[in-house]
Each structure stands twice: as C-alpha cells, then as structure tokens.
Amino acid sequence: MGSRRFEKSINEWHIFSITQAIWLYRRKEKIDSLLFMGMDTHGASEPAFRSTLEVLAANGVDVMVSDNDECTPTPA
C-alpha cells in the first residue's frame, strides 16, 4: 500500500487539470488577454511551471514570464 502523503500530494496530473480548468474558465468568460505567470523558490515550482506552460501553449494562450527563470515575488 502506498504512502498516504504521496496519495494526497499534488502531482503533474493535478497541475495539468488545474491549468486546463483555468483555461476553460477564461474561454467561457471570453478572456483572451495576456496571462502573466510567475514561480516561487519552492522545489516543485520549476516542474510545475513547465507543465503549466505546456497546457497554456497547447491552448494558444499568450503568456508573459520573467527573464532567465527568475522567481516572482508574491504578490507581484
């Protein structure tokens, strides 16, 4: 039996699903403006950032990100 902690943790499929839901909401509300996206210093941020960009790019969303993979202060 797997670890309960692992079963409840966020994984790449969660990131894909959440990002797709955001895109669906934006489409429903006819929001087609540029999306600004940042990441923090948490260890999982970089892979989550890349997965999110994959979904947004596949849906044709224009995304603005910081230069050189810089972290984005919260709130920014």
Image (cartoon, grey):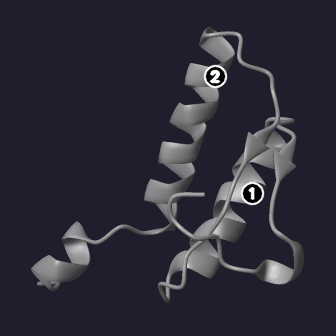
Check disc 1 and report the residue beneath it: 53
Q: How many marks?
A: 2
* Residue at figure coordinates x 56%, y 34% from the top left: 22
Question: Along the line of sight, which residue is nearer the eye, 11 or 72?
Answer: 72
Q: Is residue 57 left or right of residue 22?
A: right
* Residue at figure coordinates x 81%, y 26% from the top left: 33
Question: Along the line of sight, which residue is nearer the eye, 18 or 37?
Answer: 37
User: Mark 1 touching mark 2, by CB under 8 A?
Assistant: no
Q: CA distance from mark 1 to mark 2?
A: 15 Å
Q: Is residue 11 left or right of residue 46?
A: left
Check disc 2 and report the residue beneath it: 26
Q: Amino acid at mark 2?
A: Arg
Quadrant (top left, top right, bottom left, bottom right) of the C terminus: bottom right
x and y percentages locating residue 37 in the rendered image:
69, 55
Asked if 67 appears above or below 31 in the picture, the reply is: below
Asked if 69 appears above or below 22 in the picture, the reply is: below
Q: Amino acid at mark 1?
A: Leu
x and y percentages locating residue 23 in the rendered image:
64, 31
Q: Mark 2: give few (<14), some (14-19) or many (20+) Cα within 10 Å.
A: some
* Residue at figure coordinates x 82%, y 47% from the top left: 63
x and y percentages locating residue 39 in the rendered image:
61, 70
Question: Along the line of sight, which residue is nearer the eye, 34 or 10?
Answer: 34
Asked if 2 appears above or below 54 in the picture, the reply is: below
* Quarter residue 73 falls in: bottom right
- Helix, strand or loop at mark 1: helix
* Quarter residue 70 falls in: bottom right
Asked if 12 appears above or below 75 in the picture, the reply is: below
* Residue at figure coordinates x 28%, y 72% from the top left: 9
Quadrant (top left, top right, bottom left, bottom right) of the N terminus: bottom left
Q: Mark 1: give few (<14), some (14-19) or many (20+) Cα within 10 Å.
A: some
x and y percentages locating residue 26 in the rendered image:
64, 22
- Helix, strand or loop at mark 2: helix
